[in-house]
Image (cartoon, grey):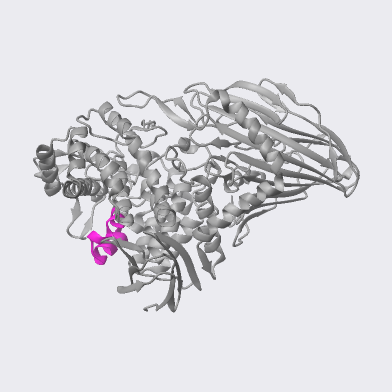
Amino acid sequence: MNEHHFIQDEWKIIEEGFDPSSVRASESIFSLGNGKMGQRANFEEDYSGDSLRGHYVAGIYYPDKTKVGWWKVGYPEYFAKILNAPNWIGIRVIAEGTSLDLARLRPLSFRRELDMRHGILLRRFTVVLPGGKELAVESIRFLSMADDETAAIRYTLTALRGTIDLEVIPYLDADVRNEEANYGEKFWQVEKNIVTPAGGIIQVRTRKLDFRVSTGITCDLSEAGRKKEMSSWQRDHARLSRSATLTLKEGEKAVLHKFAVIVSSLYYEPDEMPQVTERKLKAVVDRGFDRMLQDHKEVWKRIWQEKDFVIRGDLAAQQGIRFNIFQLQQTYTGKDERLNIGPKGFTGEKYGGSTYWDTEAFAFPYYLYSGSREIARNLLLYRYRHLPKAIENAKKLGFKDGAALYPMVTMNGEECHNEWEITFEEIHRNGAIAYAIYQFTRYTGSHEYLFRYGLEVLIALSRFWSQRVNWSEEKKKFVILGVTGPNEYENNVNNNWYTNYLARWTLQYTLESIEHMRREEPESWKRLKTRTSFRESEETGRWQKIIDNLFLPEDPKRRIFLQQDGFLDKELRTVDELDPSELPLNQHWSWDRILRSCFIKQADVLQGLYFFEEHFDTATVRRNFDFYEPMTVHESSLSPCVHSILSSRTGDLERAYRLYLRTSRLDLDDYNKEVSEGLHITSMAGTWLALVEGFAGMKIRDRQLFLEPRIPQQWESYAFMIRFHDHLLHIRVTHTGILIEQKGSTSLTLYVQGDQHNLPPEVEVSIPLKI
């Protein structure tokens, strides 16, 4: 897909013209979801060209047996895969005896629109049929945000030239497979295939773990404005369909409404699921397409009233952030603490749809700052519920006494990633989880979660770090050996600065939290000590010793922190010395060559400076940024946002702006040449952070809100909302001033450009922007 393949528009993603080579990429870009399920933008009608068909149901996965070259002790038995669920969108059309297939009938015109304001996918195209007849097709699709177990399609056929004979066959197909299946096996087996007065229903069951999904469809058809009767339902083992033949005179239309209900055993008992599906099918038919659509639009209206980020004067930047927010909101709604956010969300199979450290490091602050406290709390509870599994994961690797290693990749708390340099070595994920607990406590000003749940997690994490370090006689320091940091272009290194710093900080934060709980809730602390078998004097003494003596690699000459012990042994080059044809490196260089190079996949030292900026002065941040940025290829989607934030905070707005565009349009412009595999959902939260923490300079210190707004010269203004404690703040920044509207019911004190401001309830204040 070429850069700027899509037409720029404030509220829409628009594709004009049909290019078979970009079908997979567009299927990702135009994906829809509603928190409980997601659908790639596959065509309803037959398509024999290259396509990745995908419909995914939240929380439903398959333990696909691990496939590796050779087994290592500690490897997980499976890689969890989100399942390609039964295909509910299918509508086969036979026109003048020819299957409507855009791989065979090249369209005269083709337009696809993702309406982000309303959460609707619209597609229109025109084809020439045998004999020169012309047929126009329009499809409108949505996955309801108002009732997240339902979806609907309005499919319109118009005879533009000549009288056209048609057969229309809406169907439900459970004979589906995952493209990324380690052994090529199908993950589903059909349990029930039934026809009811409300419609056709197929219930499938996973071949392992016994998850069930029940999918029901029903439809109505009109021909030239008159209701058209359809055939009775036809069934075979994994498919349900019905059909109708019709003849459209020139200018006449046929309109098919197709409704779907998708329910899972995550919410219902398997035996009751067909009845639930039937009941909900009746309800959607009674409601009708237009009313369903209106209810769906109302939800999106409420979302955008609080979530929108408005940029004036820069269409590419505006389209980028709205696309990112749209995808985040339709991926995770925060209603269920058992669910989390996969790096691809519901848009593809890569990464299995599982949870990574991306959630805590990037997605969590977006939901914390922009949503309700409960949504962010549910993300933390997801990890708390998995603590026993994290302890079990660590035990498999030889750790003991309640030490926890959270998985790099998981669905249910078990580790299911099978690349040794990540599974065993990318242990910094433990630190990201600790940081999210700290972030939640600092931002909300409440210790309820910390005392009730979070400290138990922190103790288990600190026990891991205490056992993972070892004493170096040569250095006379504790060291952490054999790790991989966020920069996965260095594996099995010693003393990764980011990992070591996080480990030390986690130990310190745990000690501080213990002291706080002992002081504030002594009886609760006693119960927690008993529950965790905490040997207070022994364990806290060792932790403090590690804090005081943990090695952090530095270069005193350059006055920078080192990625790891051996980084300066590399040939230090900058990205601008590379031949552009060699990028991305991971698609052109051998892994051996990448590992020996200085080139950085994503922010590593800089990730730590982003997390803990208040620990360092601006000159230190700038020195490290100026050293590492020129060597960073940003071949991780999680990288540009951190660099953009640090560029803003060190005053380099032009670089911050360029990096913001890269992160906000990463998928729209396919910078990393991989959008066909799915979107980068978790990095989209980083895009929002690049704006709010970067350009707007939002920080929390001592439970106080600070803003240091800056504005790129390319923009006229920008505006957004955040929730801080019980206050909803609308903030608008121009080149001359900052306008803050305080919508809370009590007064709020905050700091803008270093000055304290006290905002009474329901007030709007204007503050000049300092040059």
Q: Position of residue 339 (x, y in %)?
A: 45, 39
For image coordinates 23% across by 59% down, the residue present is: 615
Q: Quadrant of residue 744?
A: bottom left
User: Is residue 271 something that shows in the picture?
Assistant: yes
Magenta-colored segment: predominant secondary structure: helix
Image quadrant occupied by the C terminus: bottom left
- In the image shown, does 628 or 63 lie closer to the viewer? 63
Q: Position of residue 366 (x, y in %)?
A: 42, 54
Q: Quadrant of residue 202?
A: top right
Q: Position of residue 135 (x, y in %)?
A: 82, 45
Residue 341 falls left or right of residue 668 = left
Q: Is residue 459 magenta?
A: no
Please report the bounds of the magenta region as a residue range. Answer: 608-627
Q: Is residue 610 magenta?
A: yes
Q: Quadrant of residue 118?
A: bottom right
User: Is residue 715 something that shows in the picture?
Assistant: no
- Against 768, residue 3 (above or below) is above
Residue 506 falls left or right of residue 263 = left
For image coordinates 60% across by 59% down, the residue present is: 11
- Against 704, residue 419 (above or below) is above
